[in-house]
Every structure is written in structure tokens, then in C-alpha cells.
Image (cartoon, rainbow, N blue to C red):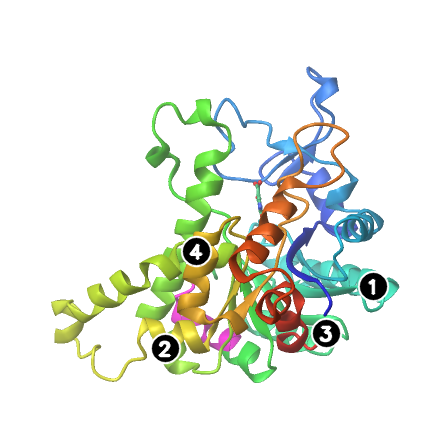
Amino acid sequence: MPVVDVHTHMYPPAYMKLMRSRDKIPYVRSFPDDPAAGDRLVILPAEDTASTTRGRPIGREYFDVNEKIAFMSKHGIDVSVISLANPWLDWLPSDTAAETARLVNDDVESMCAQHEGRLYAFGTLPLSAPAEQIVQEVSRLATLDHHRGVVMGTSGLGSGLDDPALDPMYAAIDRTGQLIFLHPHYGLPTSVYGERASDYGHVLPLALGFPLETTIAVTRMLLSGVWDRFPRLQVLLAHSGGTLPFLAGRIESCIAHDAHLKKEGKLGNRRDVWDVLKNNIYLDAVIYGEAGLKAAVDTSGAERLMFGTDHPFFPPLDEGEDEWLSVKLNSQAVRSTFGNNTKIAEAIMGGNAKQILRL
Ligand code: 5CU
């Protein structure tokens, strides 16, 4: 059974060119007052604290497809489904978004074609463009040989994924049999991290802000009836669904006990959280531990869980460490939870992705 990585990012050359031309988030640049720091990638809203102002170092692993292939070979990964990393095209002016999306997606498609059988992709959408241009790109992606869905953040057209104006996009994704890879970026308001946030590097926004952002976004989709209107729509959630598998019972109970929802007649004919988790949600296995994997399997089923690495984020901190701890933690967690070489472990490490994504 092949090992397949469904959560692995790149900034293809067309996107890097854009980031290098900017000095507002997101951007890539060096700082003359600190030449030793080299090029820095600054993307997160929370990267305005003293310890993280200058984002993180960026090397070829972020944009050079040969580095991706070398990383895969080093870590025993047969196939990667690459996606543009955050913040995608969310920040582009409306009038250039559609053309940029086509450029970026074509860039990625040609990388996949150069490495036939090893690379597939989730495309990116021009979410700041008019709705018909978004739908056009969804339809075009469905015709590209190596694309299997779209990656997106939680902002939608600017007001979240529970926005009814997204229905034409959901309908097009559903109609073309693609899936949405939903990934966080915006986190929580920085005020929740407190006065000493800058003492703690990236830990609070990445460990907690990201998963809670995903959990809130998906709960809003549920509450607004996205899966009642699009019962076949499939969504792959990053980081094993944030905290959704753990909180599903509480979310469901809060819905069932909500007097406002009852008065509005919204409790009658609805699909509950468990039903959606089992039939519409795929989860990646990027959770670095047994407890998270068990919760994921309990809620969505082992056949809906797929291995990922989050490469090139979370590189080793010390030079000369070829094997990435972040990758080892995720693959070891799968094997220690489900056994070495068991059918279930092999399915999670690649068999599920092979079948679900038609690789
Ligand atoms: O380290 C980070 O900031 C990130 C990020 O921005 N996106 C991601 O997918 N993982 C880690």
C-alpha cells in the first residue's frame, strides 16, 4: 500500500513572485538590519508579537518541487497531494484574483505532471472575485488531470463559510465531485493570548488558534445548514478537525437545547453533527498523538482518516537533522494507535487517500 501525504503545502513560483513584491502580510523579504536571518516568510495575523514579527525562515522547501520530492523520498512518502499554503488568494483585489488563481493552479498542475504518479493537488480559488469567476475556476479545476479538489481557509467570501452567497461554489464543488480541504489561517483574536503572548513564540496561535478556528468554521457551516442543502458535499478538515471530534457531543447537545433554534423551527428536519461527521467529513491525521487519532476515528471512522505531514511547516529546529520530527510523530502515532502494518494503519497511511482521491 502506498504512503500518501494529503496535507503538504507549497508556494509555487507564481505565488512566490507575488509575495516577494509585497511588504504587507503576506510577504517574503530579507531585512537589511539582520542579514543573517535570510529571507523570512511572514503570513500569520498573529505574527505581530515581538517574538514572531519576522515570521519564519523560508528556504527552497517552500517553493522548489525537487525539494518536495527529496523530502518525500527521505520520509518514505510515495504520493503527495500538494496544496497552496495559507493565506492562499484571500487577500487579492477582486479584479486580479481569477487570473492569479489560474496562474497558480496551472503552475501546480505542471509540477504534478513533471512528477507523474508522485504528485496530485488541491487547487486554490479566487474567493475575492465575483461568484461566477469562482464557479468557473471550480469547473476548470475538475478538468485538470492532477487536481482532486480545492484548498480553502475559513473566511469564504469575507464573512465565513456559513454565508449563503457561497452556495453556487458549494454546488459546483459538489456537482464536479471534488472535495474541499479546509485549513485554518486566521486563528483567534490576538487579545485572547494575553499580554505575555510574545514570550511564547508561535505556540498559542498554531496549537490552539488554528484548531479552534477550524472548529468554529465547521460548526457555523453545520448551523447554517450547508450539509442539509448539499448532502453529498465532502470536506477534508486539517489537523484532524481541530477540536471538532472531541467537542461534537457538546455541540450537538447545545443545538438540541437551544430555545432560539427551536422557536425558529430549525430543530425539526436537520442532519445532526454525528451524521455529518460520518458521511461528509474526512479528517487528516496531523494531530501528533493517540488521543486525537482515537477521537477522529470514533467520530468519522477509520476509513475517513488520511495521513499528512504539514510539510514544509514545522521543520527541525537544529541544522543537519534530515529526518523531520513532525513527520515521525504523526506516522508513529498512527502505528502506535492502530498497530504496525495492520490493515487499518495502512489504510490511514495511504489506502484511504488512494481510494477517496482516485490516485
Ligand atoms: O507554522 C505556521 O505558521 C503554519 C502555517 O502557517 N500553516 C500551516 O499549514 N502550518 C503551519
Residue furthest right in the image: 114
Sequence order check, earlier mark of 2 and 3: 2
Q: Is residue 12 left or right of residue 288?
A: right
Tell me which residue sits at (50%, 49%) in the image: 289
Q: Which residue is mark 4?
A: 214
Choose mark 2 or mark 4, whichever is in front.
Answer: 2
Q: Which residue is mark 1?
A: 110
Tell me which residue sits at (62%, 76%) in the image: 356
Sequence order check, earlier mark of 1 and 3: 1
Q: Residues within 10 Å of mark 1 (few under 14, many from 20)?
A: some
Q: Which residue is mark 3?
A: 359
Choose mark 2 or mark 1, whichever is in front.
Answer: 2
Residue 269 to residue 85: above or below? below
Query: What amino acid type is highlighted by mark number 1?
Result: Ser
User: Whole-Å distance between the Cαs marked 2 and 3?
Assistant: 27 Å
Q: Residues within 10 Å of mark 4 (few under 14, many from 20)?
A: many
Q: Is residue 65 left or right of residue 142?
A: right
Q: Secondary structure at mark 3?
A: loop
